[in-house]
Image: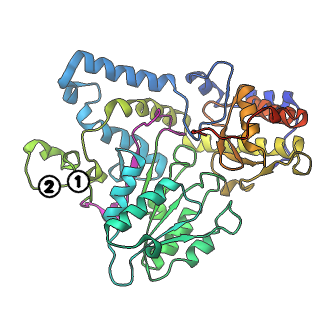
Amino acid sequence: MTAHFKEDRDFACSLDQEDRLAPFIDRFYKLPGIIYMDGNSLGLLSKDSEKSLLRMIEEWKELGINGWMNAEIPWFTYSEKLAALQAPLMGALSEEVMVSSSTTINLHSLVRSFFKPAGNRRKILMDGLNFPSDIYAVKAILMDSDLDPEQNLLLAPSTDGRFLDENDLIGCMDESVSIALFPSVLYRSGQLLDISKLTQAAHERGILVGFDCSHSAGAVPHSFDDDDVDFAFWCNYKYMNNGPGGTASLFINRRHLPMNPSLAGWWGYAKERQFDMNLEFKPSESAGAFQTGTPHLLSTAPLEGSLALYKEAGIDRLRRKSLRLTDYLIFLLDTLLPEAESGFHVGSPREQARRGGHVALEHTEALRINEALKSRGILPDFRFPNVIRLAPVPLYTSFTEVWDTVHHLKEIIESGEYRNYSKKRGDVA
C-alpha cells in the first residue's frame, strides 16, 4: 500500500496534477480557508446541485401548481426519475429504488413490512457497533409487535470495539432470527462489511437481510441485485451531497415486488391511478409503493445535480481515487505520526476491500485535538470518546489537502497545542 508514496509535499502536488478527477473540485463550493474532511457527515454543495435546486424554485415561482406536470422534470414523477439515476450506483434496477422520506422512516417502513414473526423466528439480528438510531427504531418496532427487545433483539458483539467479523455475525444467525440488519460501513471505524457473504449466509438459513448504506452510498459501488440483498436504505446528505436533511433513498429486491408497505400513504399508490382517490389502497408495483406523503421536492432537488456529477465522474473512478486518498492518509499517519511517538492509532481497516470512505484516527486526547484542528482551519469529525474521523471525498478533496491535514496534526501533537482546549464535549460533536 505504501511503497509508491513519498512524504514530501511536492509528491502530494504531483498526485493532484495526475488526478483526472481534479477538475470536479471546481464544481463545488469549498469553504474559504477550510480543509473540509467531514464529507462523511455532510457533503459540500456542488454548483450542479445549486442549479437543480434554483431551477425548481423558479418552476414553483413561474408555474405554481402546474409544476406537477409541466416542470422540466414533472414533479409528479420526480422521485422516480432520480431513483432511476441513482439505481446504477447501487447495482439495482430503477424499479427497485426510490428516493423518499428520511433514513429512519425508511428503516421503519422496510423492517415493519418485512418482519413477520412466526413460530420460533421472532428475533431481529443487529450488531453492537451499529448507529444508535437504527437500534432505537428496531426496538420500537419490536415493542409495537408485542415483543420484548431485551429478548428479541440480538446484538452481535465486536471482539475489539472497532470491527466486526462476518463469521461471528453468521454464527448468530440461528433458527430464531427472522431478519438480519447490518450497516454496510461501520460509522466509527469505516469498516466495509462483506455484503455478499452475509446475504448468502442469511438466505441459506432462511433469514431476510437488509443493510443501512448511509456510510457507503456514493462512496462505494454496490451490487444489490448480484448480491441478492433483500432491502436497503441510506441517507443522501453525506457522500451524495444532497444537503442537510436531504431526502433519503431505499431499495427493495424485485423478488419482493409488488409489496404492501406497512406505512402506507397516498404517494405510494399506483401512479396511473393515484388521483382516483379510491379508499382501497393499490400499491405501486415498484419500490415507489414505499413512498408515503407528498415528496419534499426542495429537499430532493439538490440530489438531481449531484447524480449528474456522479454519472459524469463514474462511481468506479471515484472509488479508486477514494482508496488512493485514504491509502495516502494512512501512509502519512504511519510515517509522520507513528503510534509509539504520537499516541495515534489508525482505527480503520488497512485492506482496501475492507475500508469505506473515511479513516478513523484514535487518540486519548481526540476531543481536544479535534478542536485544535478546527481552530487551524481543518474541519474533521469527532466521535465520542476517542475517534477523529477524516473523510477525503474524491469529488472535492485534493491530495495536497490530505498532506496539509496530517502536518497540522503533527504540529498540534509536537507542540502540545491541544492542551489549550477544554476536555468538555459540546452538545453537538
Distance Cα–Cα, label 1 vs label 2: 8 Å
Percent across and percent down for residue 181 are: 47, 64
- Given the image, on which type of amino acid does mark 2 rest? Phe
Q: Residue at x 69, y 19 (%)?
A: 33
Magenta residues, as a range?
A: 237-260
Percent across and percent down for residue 356 are: 63, 50
Q: Nearer the viewer, residue 363 or 247?
A: 363
Percent across and percent down for residue 322 are: 66, 42
Instruction: Name which quarter of the figure residue 83 lies in.
Output: top left
Dot 2 lies on which element?
Answer: loop
Q: Which residue is mark 1?
A: 264
Main secondary structure of the magenta stretch: loop
Q: Are marks 1 and 2 in contact (CB under 8 Å)?
A: yes
Q: Residue at x 62, y 74 (%)?
A: 167
Give the mark nearest the N terminus, 1 or 2. Answer: 1
In this view of the protein, can residue 148 be seen by the observer?
Answer: yes
Q: Is residue 405 left or right of residue 173?
A: right
Q: Let me know if residue 126 is in the magenta part.
A: no
Dot 1 lies on which element?
Answer: loop
Instruction: Name which quarter of the figure residue 111 lies in.
Output: bottom left
- Given the image, on which type of amino acid does mark 1 rest? Ala
Q: Nearer the viewer, residue 236 or 73?
A: 236
In this view of the protein, can residue 231 be seen by the observer?
Answer: no
Q: Is residue 325 left or right of residue 282?
A: right
Q: Residue at x 35, y 53 (%)?
A: 96
Q: Which residue is mark 2?
A: 281
Q: Is residue 195 above or below residue 21?
A: below
| Badge 2 density bin: few <14, some 14–19, many ≥20, Cα 10 Å | some
Percent across and percent down for residue 58 are: 31, 17
